[in-house]
Amino acid sequence: MLSAACQHTPSENQKHQSANFPDIALISDSLNIKYAQGFTIEYGPSFKIVHILKPFQDVADTLSYLLLSHNTAVPEPYQDLPVINIPLQKLIVLSTTHLGLVEALESNDILQGVANTEFLCNLDLRQKAARNQLISVGEDNTLNSERIISAHPDLLMASGMQSATFRQYTVLQQAGIPVMVNSEWLENTLLGRGEWIKLMGALLNKEKEANIYFNHIETEYNKLKTLAASVPEKDRVSAISSMPYKGTWYVPGGNSYLAHLLYDAGAKYHWSDSPESGSLSFDFETVYPVALQANFWFPGDLITSKNDLRERDSRFSSFKSFKTGQVYINNKRMCEGGGNAYWTSGVVNPHLILADYIKAFYPQLLPDYELYYHNRVEY
Amino acid sequence: MIKKKKMETATLPKKSIHHSNKPALLLMVLLVVLLFAFMLADIMLGSVRVPAIEVIRIIAGKDTKNEAWNNIITLIRIPKAFTAMLAGCALSVAGLQMQTLFRNPLAGPSVLGITSGASLGVALVMLSSGMATSMYTIRSLGIPQGWLMVLAAVAGAIMVLLLIIMIATRIRDNVVLLIVGIMVGNITLAIVSIWQYYSNPQQIQDFLIWTFGSLGGVTRQHLVVLAVTVLAGLVLTIFSAKALNAWLLGEGYAKSMGLDILKSRIFIISATGLLAGGVTAFCGPIGFVGIAVPHLSRALFGTSDHKILIPATCLIGSILMLFCDIMAQLPGSDQSLPINAVTALLGSPVVIWVILRQNQLRMSFS
Amino acid sequence: MNKPGTILSTENLTTGFYKKNRFRKVSVSLTVAANIQLQKGQLTCVLGVNGSGKSTLIRTLTGIQKPLEGEVNLSDKRIKDYASRKLAKKLSVVLTDPVVVKNMQVYDLVAMGRFPYTNGWGHLTKADKSKIDWAITTAEVTTLTNQPLYELSDGELQKALIARALAQDTPLMILDEPTSHLDIPNRIMIMRLLRKLARDNGKTILLSTHELDLALQMADQLWLMLGKKIITGVPEDLVLSKAFEQTFRKEGETFNRQTGSFQVHTPWRKSIRVQGDPTGVFWTKRALEREGFIVIDEGVASVSIEVKGVEAYEWVIQGKGKKMTCHTVECMIAYLNDKENLRQGTASFENNKTEK
């Protein structure tokens, strides 16, 4: 059952989609991708094909994968594609955001390994790790290929952030372990990121659940967005993100998901005109005048108090946001081993992140809402 | 051979018998045995425990009940062990040639900035072409890309070598030469860092990970490229063995004995560039092995004859690198340490020992 | 190109080097337009003061350095036309370059002399080995063959280097200051060895040296670096023609043609006549000259000394109406230096310092 054609198509991705999928046993529900620009899914008679359109930040290249049921013959024209057997029964993920996707589809039981079990937030998973049923496989240059080969998952999901380690992935591929790049982090909207749940759905044959889940967050998100849009132009607040690092301040580009989040929450953003979908690097003094005037500041989760900020750089204390106590940190849901649920479940809860921002900017709009991921730094 | 020697002694009664090469041969056989032992040990050790018998069965090409073990051994451990062997041999032989050519006991690929030159070449490839690391490119152009890296690294290494030679002909002071080498290294690293400033974070991360040095990152396709490069370098070195002996006496004597100085220099530099550059391209800058191993082999074999030193240095270098790799895996056996850290830990004491035993240094070199 | 009997000759040879000043390269010549010959089977020594260009000449004749102008002919060809391997079979050298690889064994060092004859791998054939053995025996380093170079004394190392040059089996050997840094017995040993090689083995040997005495005694021919010219000849001719004196005048030393050695001491005292046993007289003279006296064999002097004895010497000093017998040179000198002993009379023994 194909969902209704979407009104505001962000990309031409849908054209790959096929309306023919007679094998109902294989495909429970089809997918319609509205926001995400990084992947497409094609449906064949007894298979699915996933295209990852932008696996790396620096590379415009398409990686394609053939998703097949166990014991199904590879269809003729797709001999060259890497095959992923679905539904996945054993999965290793390298990014915490992937965990959110799995958890949202209630499929934590298929997880076989993560980059580092220390940073797990889910208690069940932590216990599983304690029982050695969930392994740490490292990432980047510490990726432990031997353990992955030994575990032999149906799929290794990599974040695509570490293109340098791709040489190690070739070894895994030679060992018959497909490696999929899940570059959800390159999307430039929160809904686009959240929509990658549909990819996970396709891998798990849980298209239906994925659609239901995404429709829910989409509705919630858009409701909130409309709410924030009601704020008159003159009442709109300004905000900045992130913190300087060694003299360089990487601020979100005007087309990044963080910038879009600010617009959707009804805030003004100084670099909204820049076309960057990644980050912009500035020296401190370029950002300083903007930071001085901004009403709100979201510096990240590396600090916990005003004192922390002052110790990092005493100039922070002259920021308007600092003086008025409008600094928000996404550390409300830190976990035992140092993980942060913001990074795990945030990807599938874009509406909650948006609600946090709206609550911060215009508390009167959401009087009964309590911040979900963020803490206001008052002291 | 010994018989012949005796006959000659008989005809020339006053002459004392010159020593035979028997101990050298014996030592060499011992080293080969040791090399196999270390290689086996390196293949047996890893974060996943594979029973020794299974390892041997897999090496012997027999079926194993566990496909994962088979993959781990054939796809990860054997390529890594071969990489270690090639890297150790290549860097050490490169170091040996540089010590002879510059007549400087502290010369080595990393000290004289040769690896920095190779790094510059690699940076050129990594930071200027983003496509270098995509999965598709690797699958379809895996080997050409490997060759490109090697080409750039070897060119970078040779460039620095030529610069050092140019300076060395003007300045005969060993210490000055070392300082110049360090400066050349710094300049190339500075160029690399300026370059990084203009590259995107992904490419920088690529490059930074590469600079940690790694033996495990070499896939089978790359291993072929590495092996061909190293073998070419070794063949050139073997052709230079006689010439290297002449270089020991200095340029004046070498020339007076009929050595074509220019040709020989080109041979030696090309060989060094291929060896050091090839390894650096795939394994990153690995330090200290190149300086330390030639001294170890000279001490062990008590000779300065390159016909013995070249194979000896190659063998000891391979063994040492395998040992370093084993060491890198030992702690906790969960994750391996960066190979660079291990070679530095094991190699720098040797360098310090060389400096401390200045008397010995003078005896053997200056 | 060379006359019969001549192995090496030069045609208007100008040696020197190029110096870079701020704007361009300037040539600095040390020897100008030299036409000299090296005779087969002879030992020839190049002598000259420091900086006169001995080393440059040697390096130019061996082909290591290019001449500024002119040509060097070796046997029947110009030296620059030789292929390097061919040249290495004609000419071997012993240089002043330090041998830095001292853990090499003497045998291996000598074996390197076979470099131009061995194959690409440097394999030593039976013929090579017997040549090496011959070189080792001839250079008298037989007992050192298995020793590493760092265990050798300077003299032994020099002999080993000569053995290496011998193993190269060339009719001509050129040595740059083979005796410097050696003590006297070693200098003599090296010169004796070279003399023997020339006489017994028919080698033509050219060497530069500072050892005037040895060169005068051992060389068949001398080349004196006089200014920018080279004066050649048999040692005795050069001494008698004052060329020797002229060559070394630069150093402010006086060459004594009578003794064939340098006069080191400038006399500032009166004459003393010395007579007696020849050996005794020889050493007495040395002592007196060191003290600044002029020593004469006969004629009139206010003081005279008679040296007596064969086994145990005694010195009878007469003058100023006094007589003194000494049993050591030390005693004699003390006596002569003591003003009191020679006060009587004209005080002619006293120098100006003692005037009061």
Image (spheres, coloured by chain):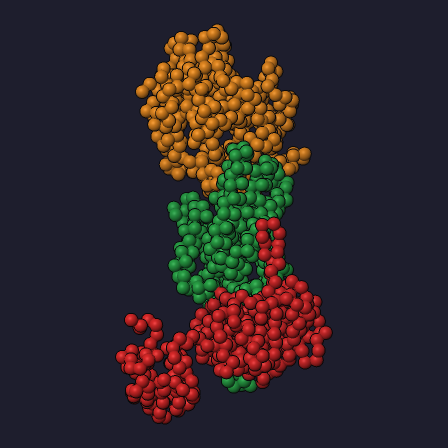
Chain colours: A orange, B green, C red
The extreme bottom residue here reads C310
A116 on left or right of A8: left
Q: Residue at x 39, y 19 (%)?
A: A319
Q: Is residue C51 visible?
A: yes
For the residue pair A177 and A195, the one nearer the viewer reads as A195
Q: What x and y, as percent, mark residue A296?
A: 42, 17
Q: What x and y, as percent, mark residue A340?
A: 40, 27
The extreme right residue here reads C1
A216 on left or right of A11: left
For the residue pair C1 and B292, the one nearer the viewer reads as C1
Q: Residue at x 36, y 25 (%)?
A: A314
Q: What x and y, as percent, mark residue B356?
A: 39, 59
Up-down relation of residue A260 to residue B112 (above or below): above
Q: Residue at x 62, y 52 (%)?
A: C24
Up-down relation of residue B74 to residue B196 (above or below): below
Q: Is residue C177 visible?
A: no
Quadrant that contains the N terminus of chain B: bottom right
Q: Residue at x 56, y 22 (%)?
A: A275
The extreme left residue here reads C340
Q: How many circles with numbers are drawn on the protein? A: 0
A31 on left or right of C292: right
Q: What x and y, as percent, mark residue A231?
A: 47, 8
For the residue pair B171 and C99, the one nearer the viewer reads as B171
**Res. A131 image quadrant:** top left
Up-down relation of residue C254 to residue A112 (above or below): below
For the residue pair A367 and B57, the one nearer the viewer reads as A367
